[in-house]
Structures are given as structure tokens and as C-alpha cells.
Image: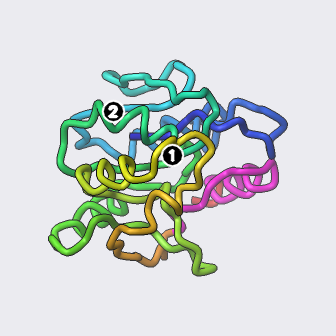
Amino acid sequence: MAAAGGAGRRLGGADKPALTVGGRPLLDLVLAACPDARQLLVVGPERRTERAGVRWLREDPPGGGPVAAVAAALPEVTAPRLLLLAADLPFLDVATVRRLLAALDDPARDGALLVDADGRDQPLAAAYRTAALRTALAALGDPAGRPLRALLAGLRLARLPDPADASFDCDTWTDLAEARERAERR
């Protein structure tokens, strides 16, 4: 599941998932990091992607935030585990996705998220048990405008260091320029 419905306010309302790094739209880079996904659910306005089989969903209200996006997608999830990924992660890779999912092999964990170099949790670069998220969402009530930390507060989460900078996201024009420079160097 990818969340592509943010307003992109720090980018002046630009269509963030369509912005390119390394010549590819950000959303396509995120979807490419999940080649083994049986379901591809994207919450946000429908757009063209390189990946076939994407199912488009909308949060209520549109732009209602990440918890509203989870609420829109969760009823459609059929797998026992899911990836919750922002649509602006240009350096997310297959190895990181597999590492997140492997962390859920421990039955004591409800989820696994990346922790960036500054020590900040990245809950939109994470894997979760579907049942745990459903329980947390039901307990939360109305999801519109609620912070993701409220949804995840009661979950038992593994926090994985992010040495590859896979959780680097493009929230500002400066971030986007940095991502493009990094992509050129790679």
C-alpha cells in the first residue's frame, strides 16, 4: 500500500508522486521496490504508473492524512502483512522492503519501521501486521486528520536502522534537488 494523497503543501501543491528522480516518477520508484507484492493499493488521485495492477483508492475526506489513507486501504488488504509506504521515497529498494517484512517473522512484533539517521521513526517506511492495524484503527475512531503516531501508539514495533537512506523522502524542493543529485552520483 502506498499513500499518494498528500497535499504537497511544502512543494506549493505540486503533484509530489509524479515528480521525478533519476528520470522516474517517485511513485514508480516506490512501487518498483515491491516486486513481490500480490496487491498494489495506492491511496490518492489515479495516475499513470509503470506497474500494472495498481488499485486506486481515495481517503475520506480527500487529503485527510495518512490515517485516513490507511482507513481507506485497510478493508481491501487480503494479506496478513502489509507495507505502508509514502509515495515519495526515491531510495527505497527491494532489500529494505524484504528486511522490513522479515522483521515481522517475530510473532511478538506488530510492525517494523525504519529509523532515519537522526533517530526519527519513519512510520510510512514500514511493514505491519494487517490485523494489528485493523484493531488499532477500530480503537482510534474517526481517522480524518489524526496523526499516524496515534494509530501506532499501542503497537509493538521493531525499529530498524536505515543505513541505506531508504526512508529519505522528498517533502521540499530542497529535498527533491538533493535526491536528484544523489541519484546522479549513484
Q: Is residue 119 left or right of residue 69?
A: right
The part of the chain drawn in magenta is 165-183
Tell me the residue that label 2 is attached to: 40
Residue 165 in percent (x, y) is at 54, 67
Residue 166 is one of the magenta-drawn residues = yes
Residue 60 in percent (x, y) is at 54, 28
Residue 64 in percent (x, y) is at 61, 36
4 vs 131: above or below: above
Instruction: Estimate how packed mark 2 is, as few (under 14), some (14 to 19) or many (20 or more) residues with alpha carbons within 10 Å.
Output: many
The residue at 52%/47% (across/down) is 86
Q: Secondary structure at mark 1?
A: helix
Q: Between residues 106 and 185, which one lies in front from this camera angle?
A: 106
Q: Which quadrant of the figure contains the N terminus? A: top left
Q: CA distance from mark 1 to mark 2?
A: 18 Å
Q: Is residue 36 left or right of residue 2?
A: left
Q: Amino acid at mark 1?
A: Val
Tell me the residue that label 1 is attached to: 67
